[in-house]
Image: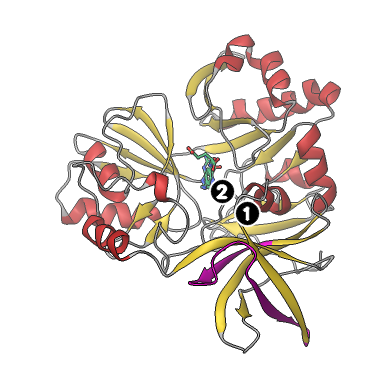
Amino acid sequence: MKGFPIVKSRRVRSSPYTSRIEKQGVTAYTVYNHMLLPAAFGSLEDSCDHLKKNVQVWDVAAERQVEIIGKDAATLVQLMTCRDLSKSKIGRCYYCPLIDENGNLVNDPVILKLAEDRWWISIADSDVIFFAKGLATGNKFDVKIFEPRVDILAIQGPKSFDLMEKIFGQKIKELKFFGFDYFDFKGVKHLIARSGWSKQGGFEVYVENTNSGLELYDQLFEVGKEFNIKPGCPNLIERIESGLLSYGNDFDNNDNPFECGFDKYVNLESSVVFLGKDKLIEIQKKGVKRKLMGVQIDLNQISLTKSLEIKDNKGSLIGELRSACFSPHFKKVIGIAMIKEPYCKVSTSGIIEIEGNSIVVKVCDLPFI
Ligand code: THG
């Protein structure tokens, strides 16, 4: 992987775990929510393979929390998302598209209901806090909105269950997918959810007590030896194979939830009030003219730094490739692309230009696995 150093500063924040992952061999960072997010520990292929078979600890402190607390907290959270949260339960996480007044996407956070009047929005890479404050002020809501000191550690991979049982006891194995509860580590309570940005299974520890979190970090690696534990990070290959979408890469504020395949998180029939609802009803009636699709390309490597135009054989634009990687599993390049009608169906093909060569891309369904 080629690259240049990122300069740390007050603006590009470190996490409590930064000094640890640097001792452990982090080789690349990206910036996410104005914070360092590890992007590689050596080869992405090797890390992907390791993640699928073992267990990794990820410093995902860059998944910041926006806390909303107060009498109108539930109303404000609902105003921001098209997912009906009226039957939501304390102790559960909800994957929710956030929508603006045009029906376009603002973010795709995990939302945690801590209490009827207290919520955490665990955000992807956009400034949700200002969106929330604007809406709260404009609507004169009785809420407090702030970024609490929470730094998530993700424990991911098939062996995460046995590792976490050894540290937190067998009750942790009873957590349901996207459920959370509080677990004791040496006298300190930690909120732990069964979730994480991989499809290999695992947990996320929402660390509020930094000292205890650092001690937990070291303990995970100590106890994890027998499970072949390694430091890791959200893995580009694994997440594309699994069809986990990335705000800013695969979609952004110019796209709506139907174009991105978020249909099952859009509840237009319910009576709940949210921003852009009328627009989404209109969009659904008309139908969308493009969709996020998978693509397969017969190449053995690719490195995208911006989207690539996809054209038909007459040179007309049919879409754009937004993320891509070489997948050792498929032995070719796979990617995520926004494809226009009528090309957004399986086995259509198009052409991309890479360093002067025309290369065929084949459209397929998401997820790949
Ligand atoms: N965990 C936490 N915060 C996050 C992420 C996370 N914030 C940023 C980013 N990731 C938000 N994006 C996603 C995208 C997908 C999922 C979670 C966060 C995800 N999706 C599951 C799936 O697609 O199978 C389940 C969704 C569901 O149906 O409920 O897990 O990873 N804390």
Q: Earlier in the sequence, mark 2 or mark 1?
A: 1
Q: What residue is shown at x 56% (from left), y 28% (from top)? A: 194
**Closest to the observer: 284 or 3?**
284
What segment carries the magenta color?
A: 335-356
Residue 331 position in % (x across, y down): 83, 56
Mark 2: amino acid: Ala
Side of 253 relative to 281 (left or right):
right
According to the image, label 1 marks what residue? 36
Element marked by disc 2: loop
Q: What residue is shown at x 59% (from left), y 37% (from top)? A: 196
Residue 110 position in % (x across, y down): 46, 41
Element marked by disc 1: strand
Can residue 201 be seen in this snapshot?
yes
Residue 5 position in % (x across, y down): 74, 65
According to the image, label 2 marks what residue? 62
Considering only vertical position in the picture, is 87 above or below 350? above
Mark number displayed over residue 227: none
Residue 283 position in % (x across, y down): 30, 63
- Do residues under tags 2 and 1 come within 8 Å of each other at their CB atoms? yes
Image quadrant where one finds the N terminus: bottom right
